[in-house]
Amino acid sequence: MYRIDNLQYANWSEKIFRQMREGGLDAVHVTIAYHENFRETVLNMEQWNRWFEQFPDLIVQGRSAADVRHAHETGRTAIFFGFQNPSPIEDDIGLVEILHDLGARFMQLTYNNQSLLATGCYEDADTGLTRMGKQVVREMNRVGLVVDMSHSADRSTIEAADFSERPIAITHANPHAWQPALRNKRDEVIRAVTSNGGMLGFSLYPHHLKDKSACTLASFCQMIADTAEKFGAEHLGIGSDLCQDQPDSVVEWMRVGRWTKEIDYGEGSAAAPGFPPMPDWYQDNRDFGNIAQGLADVGFSQAEIEGVMGDNWLRFYELNFGPKP
Amino acid sequence: MYRIDNLQYANWSEKIFRQMREGGLDAVHVTIAYHENFRETVLNMEQWNRWFEQFPDLIVQGRSAADVRHAHETGRTAIFFGFQNPSPIEDDIGLVEILHDLGARFMQLTYNNQSLLATGCYEDADTGLTRMGKQVVREMNRVGLVVDMSHSADRSTIEAADFSERPIAITHANPHAWQPALRNKRDEVIRAVTSNGGMLGFSLYPHHLKDKSACTLASFCQMIADTAEKFGAEHLGIGSDLCQDQPDSVVEWMRVGRWTKEIDYGEGSAAAPGFPPMPDWYQDNRDFGNIAQGLADVGFSQAEIEGVMGDNWLRFYELNFGPKP
């Protein structure tokens, strides 16, 4: 069994890398850009290169499914790069291949707002894929950069799932029916993604959870069971959205970037603008295994548990991180 | 026998790629930056990515010696990226690894002028390696980006050869004793490079040739024989400096970049500012094999000829393009 968390944006440190090892994580997809342009994204990669150099016994850069197996065998965590926004490619489709060469494996087409490529989930009007969006999806398909629609609007997500020649992902969100957050996904959206071979990663970010920070492990795992029944357990994994050790200034950067001079509270509010506290059963990477126990308690088979905990993401990596066959 | 031309800066086109195949070239090291900054260098890589996509039967990106063998077996030419100036890393040592990840395999520490790293061959005073220069050479050693001192001053070159923990290269120049051009290298410089395991690639750029455009194949090959006697044939290869199909505006860019408002004629003159005509026995890539015949005529053994024509560069690639062991 492999353990993969397919989305985190922590304030990385040796402490967190050691907690990844304690939690037995073989791979983590880390966000390295929210609103960064190309050069700023490269600076973030440079920072990761320093960490790979400083902590070779804990982490290693991941580029393929084979790297996850190699990390597992050598007791390390493979780190895969991803962007929550297409800002790193700016207006230049040639940067898709450049960034894939540098290790990018997931890119969201939008982050809450309209982008050059598609529409975010906070906009009133949804254009679907733009002209450039279609070109970029084809190029992402060609090189093996996965389309992620976690923060995208419904029509855009459904169009991307249908237009893409390879499966896409919602790396971190939950069903809207369970918790009606703007970021959670309606059944028709999840169906469009999973019926085309795509993946849904369940989020542990409290705004995406029923009862938020008070959500129970049993409620979370029952939601996974209900989703498995509707869409098939093989399309499901975890994308915890863990933002460990981040100051509240970072959630403001995530929401506001440089696109507005006003404060936008996103899923928070003026009364509670910061990061919400995580559920007590999921404080950090060391708690990753709790989900396996919760899944067993709601009746998942051992094979299904292994799938959700990491094997489904690993199979997805295997098929989608290389050049289009 | 592998055939490698370890420096060209042509005005690339399908025609030239086909001529590489007609000349039997298994690998070519291409200059992709003279004065370009990081972003401009990436744009040049993007242009190469389009050519790799358009002409997959002729060219393929090279990153390792294995790629040369694979190109040979599949009847293609492996293209290796290099810079004639450290401008692509700007003032940021972290870009060394980023650019190596993107395929850069040679970087000159200077292009004629003083750089942040060392001194070019046209300056009056030679600082040797600067503080940043030493740091960058260590980093280039770590990741497997080869130090090239073709356009550097003597003290800087000797210091780089001695300071570097891995062999360095002069990719394109000839002995100063044969043709006393500012760009050609004195014996003590060649000795510092070759005695540390480094390589000298002979240039066919007329300003570097005895009798310039009228240089004979016999004179060129006798010069190689004399150099082999002094420094050992195993350290020698070809770096033709072929600038095929370039307009004269390009040689001005090479010389002037953005560093001066005045014209600098470099190795040319006000009377002859443009590219000089190539010798009649070396017009383009199809003539590469002529050198093998010339080497045989001056008495080289078959094994030595194979070394100079490509096998010596291939062995050098094998040892120096990967992470430091």
Image: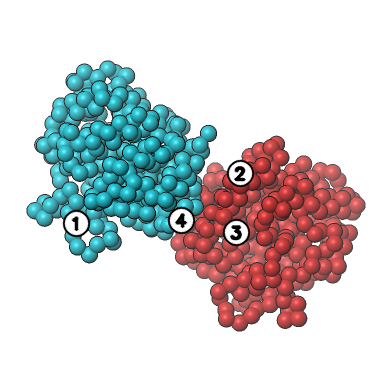
Chain colours: A red, B cyan
The answer for how far apart the CA atoms under marks 1 and 3 are is 44 Å
Q: Which residue does the image show at 30% across and 42% down from the upper left?
A: B155
Q: Quadrant of residue B249?
A: bottom left
Residue A209: percent from left, percent from top? 80, 66
Relative to B108, say whether A243 is above or below: below
Residue A137: percent from left, percent from top? 54, 58
Q: Say left or right for B254 vs A272.
A: left
Camera-near label (2 vs 4) is: 4
Residue that protrudes farthest toward the left in the picture: B271
Q: Which residue is mark 3?
A: A32
Image quadrant occupied by the N terminus of chain B: top left
Q: Which residue is mark 4?
A: B92
Relative to B217, say whether A17 is above or below: below
Q: Which residue does the image show at 28% across and 61% down from the upper left?
A: B258
Instruction: Give the crowd class for mark 2: few <14, some 14-19, many >=20 residues within 10 Å.
Output: many
Query: What kind of residue is marked 4?
Result: Asp
Q: What kind of element bears circle 1?
A: loop
Query: What kind of residue is marked 3?
Result: Ile
Q: Are marks 2 and 3 on the same chain?
A: yes
Q: Are marks 1 and 3 on the same chain?
A: no
Q: Nearer the viewer, residue B4 or A65?
A: B4
* Sequence-first disc among 2 and 3: 3
